[in-house]
Structure formats: C-alpha cells, structure tokens
Image: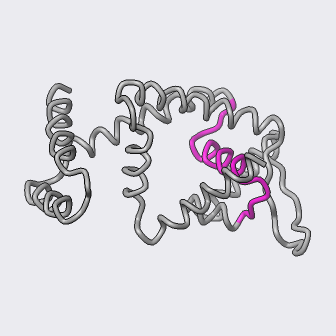
Amino acid sequence: MADINNSAKDSAGKAASTSDGGAEGSAQAAAVRAEGPIWDIIELLFFAYRDFVGDPDEVLAKYAFGRAHHRVLHFVNRNPGMKVADLLDILNITKQSLGRVLKQLVDQGFVEQKEGEQDRRQRLLYVTAKGENLALKLAQLQTERIERAFGQLGPGSHDTARRFLTAMIDDDNREGVLRLMARADRVKKA
C-alpha cells in the first residue's frame, strides 16, 4: 500500500505541474505512456470503485439485490418515465439481463412500468415511493463517501473530480452522458 500512495503522490505532482491541459498536457501524457501503465491510478480506481459500491452492496444484500439492481434504481429514479430501450443503452447490457433485474424490482414493488401515452408499445419506467427511498438511501451512502474525500482534498475538489471523470468517458459518449445528467437534474428540480 505504501508503494501505491507514493506512486499516487508522484503522479499527482506531475499532473499538478500542468494545469492548462493544452499541448504541454498532451506532451506530459505521452511521456507518462512512454514510462508504461499508470499503475497507481489504475489500482486506485479499482480500490475506490470497490469501496464506493461496497456501502450500497451491504444494503442491497438485504433485499437479495445486486449492483445491476442498484444501477436500474439509480437511473430510473433520476429519469422518471424513461423508456426501457433508453435504459438498455445507458447500462449497455442485454435485454435479457435487464429483464431479469427489472422483473425482480417490479415484482417487489420498487419500480413500475407504464405504457407510453403516444405509443402503447413503449414501456416507461418509474420508481415507486419504496424504490425512491431505496435509491436515495444508496445515493446518500455514496454521497457521504464522496464528501469525506472532498473534505480531505480542499477547495475545488468537486470541479476537479467532475472534469477528470468526464474526461474518462469515451469521446463519442461524453455529450450524451452530460445531456442525460442535465436532464435528470432538471427533472428532479421541477
């Protein structure tokens, strides 16, 4: 673990020396790639993800739910009335995989499906009050972990983390993800 921490500090120092992200940032990125894989960040992402989903996993286990249930609850809660087809695109899973998870959530009263008003073949998804409560409980656990981390990093950490994670998304998906997030924020504020 000490090697991971030292390596993370070395990479953080390198990254901090280039704040504009322009040509100098590209040259720096090429130099890092020439040195080999960025093991510290790769491993920190693995461990951060493990712990980030670990808190909700404990709650989900009480319902015999897994991470796929969590993702469905999250996105349906954030995007009420979303089409099943849109959820398939977001989660990038098969219709069969989603069908099994969705059936459990519907059967246990966490999610409901309604026909589309214009097209009755559409299946629109909504969380129930029970589903919303669980989605918010899971989001609160993750929010607490994120806020603890931001508290250790100081001012500007939220924006820096947001820019880093946005940059990690494939170019051809980035705008769609940002639109989805903006739409969900507008719906929840309304």
Instruction: From the viewer's side, name the closer residue of 179 and 97.
Output: 179
Quadrant of residue 124 within the rendered picture: bottom right
Quadrant of residue 129 within the rendered picture: top right
Tell me how many marks there are.
0
Residue 2 x, y percent position in the rendering = 16, 25
Which image quadrant: the N terminus?
top left
Residue 19 x, y percent position in the rendering = 24, 50
Instruction: From the viewer's side, name the closer residue of 30 and 135.
Output: 30
Give the vertical position of 41 relative to 54 (above or below): below
Residue 59 x, y percent position in the rendering = 62, 27
**Residue at 68% in and 45% down:** 73
Give the vertical position of 133 relative to 71 (above or below): above
Residue 98 x, y percent position in the rendering = 66, 57
Instruction: From the viewer's side, name the closer residue of 11 and 88.
Output: 11
Q: Is residue 15 left or right of residue 175?
A: left
The image's colouring method is: one colour
Q: Is residue 103 left or right of residue 16?
A: right
Q: Is residue 120 left or right of residue 13?
A: right
**Residue at 59% in and 61% down:** 90
**Residue at 27% in and 46% down:** 42
- As for residue 128 lying within the magenta part, the answer is no
Q: Start and end of the magenta stretch?
A: 63-84
**Residue at 24% in and 63% down:** 22
Give the vertical position of 57 relative to 165 (above or below): above
Instruction: From the viewer's side, name the closer residue of 3 and 172.
Output: 172
Quadrant of residue 14 within the rendered picture: top left
